[in-house]
Amino acid sequence: MTSQPDSMHAISEDTRRTVDDVLEYARRRALYEDIPLDKPMSPADLARLASGSITPDGIGAERAVSLFENVLAPACISTDHPGYLSFIPSAPSKASLAFDVVVSASAIYGGSWMEGAGAVFAENEVLHWLAHEFGLPESSGGVFVQGGTIGNLSALVTARDAARRRNREAGRSDPARWLVVCSGEAHSSIASAAEVMDVGVVSAAPDAEGRLHGDSVARALDEHGDAVFAVVATGGTTNFGIVDDIAGVAAAAKERDVWLHIDGAYGLAAMLVPELRPVFAGVEQADSVIVDPHKWLFAPFDACALIYRDPSLARLAHTQKAEYLDTLTDSPDWNPSDLAVQLTRRSRGLPLWFSLATHGTEQYRATIAYGIDLARRIGDEIERRDGVSLVRQPQLSVVVFRREGWTAADYQAWSDRLLEEQRAFVVPSSHAGEPVLRFAIISPLTTYELLVDILDSLG
Ligand SMILES: *Cc1c(COP(=O)(O)O)cnc(C)c1O
């Protein structure tokens, strides 16, 4: 007989100290006054400094925490540093990141109501608030999934399933190849979802400003007819923060009875700001929408809110059937697993729930509005300066601009130096073949002065 191995799970002096060491480090990291930017390290350097931690008897919590704090963590760029302006930064509120620790400590299974009712209820409170803000009906509902990529995929799988069902009910056959219509400016995850689903992508041309309009979508739909199962509009492109003419796209899709999905992973959060609401007109007609709390809703990695106008269609598309699951799937309960491409799930909406409950919705509106205002102010400053110019007026919180006379190599050398000096993380981007710079502003800790300082460093 094998004796019960209890040393990892028992409440002993050792395990107490381990928990204390880890939580104490988490507390230090969460409360850093000056978040270090840090930078990556070469595999060779990390091998030299950090290998050998996996041993038959373990190196102990104290050494492992120390290795992480002193070697591994500094070899990761802090995406919540106020000078992290590349890609889309993260800026979790202190309440949300602290509560993420509670989610881990609570061992909640977030996939089913039977197991996680309380957590699922709280997540649904957030999803219903978001749905209401987006103008979706009371009956809409959804689930927090890992990220926008999985959110987009799950929504499109539901859309295609609904189209197939309608064909079956009408006695029509399915097209040789299903198609999704989206803008040429749509996020790469749409093409990735299409690849996974083995469907084609029809790229509808946006206008010169990068906005997709209804006429372009209407043309694509009329050309491809019943082969199209969904139209995707973007509520804030990642590169520029451009919001499509969603009302126009919605009209074209609805007239032809085609599913409308809104990819608002980054930008849809801006709809919480009253002055920005008109920009997003048409979202209320969506069949599905996504927005990533880990982007502009100040939650930690990783979470995407996926909301359906009619969640029953998602359930038909996604519910997994297995004998061991019958007790769950045969009940009318609200099971988050049934709404997306996933089964086991972390209750990843809880950090946002806790932070929203703590601070209230007004604080969220104000913090998002700050980023939009900051983008406009620094955009104006770029226009005033010699030697730099905007590629486009910022619409949300992304500012794309050029340093006159610089080659791609100049941009790269400057960016490397900025990171080396631990001042900011601004990677060169490109637009229509031209190398450009891009500030993506999320964090309320990012200041106008910091951005001016970065502009000054462009010489
Ligand atoms: C970031 C982003 C995605 C992908 O989201 P992940 O959470 O990174 O998977 C999809 N669409 C848009 C518009 C995005 O900005």
Image: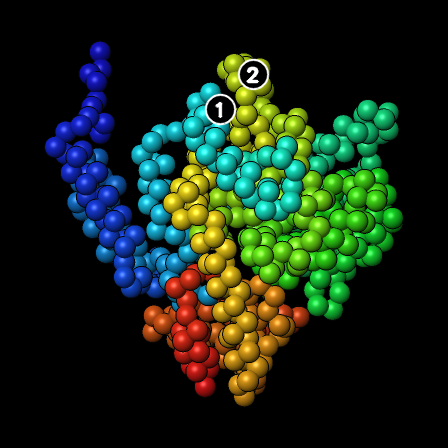
Q: Which mark is drawn over residue 113?
A: 1
Residue depicted at 71% across the width and 44% down the height: 285
Residue depicted at 72% across the width and 36% down the height: 160
The quarter holding residue 118 reads: top left
Q: Which residue is mark 2?
A: 331
Amino acid at the residue labelled 2: Ser
Expressed as whole percent of the image width and height from the top left, the position of residue 158 reads 67, 34
State whether residue 61 is above or below residue 85. Answer: above
Q: Is residue 324 visible?
A: yes
State whether residue 144 is above or below residue 331. Answer: below
Horizontal arrangement in the rendering, residue 354 relative to residue 440 (left or right): left
Residue depicted at 35% across the width and 42% down the height: 99
Horizontal arrangement in the rendering, residue 146 relative to residue 240 (left or right): left
The CA span between labels 1 and 2 is: 10 Å
Horizontal arrangement in the rendering, residue 212 relative to residue 331 (left or right): right
Amino acid at the residue labelled 1: Trp
Where does the N terminus fall, quadrant-wise?
top left
Q: Residues within 10 Å of mark 1 (few under 14, many from 20)?
A: many
Q: Secondary structure at mark 2?
A: loop
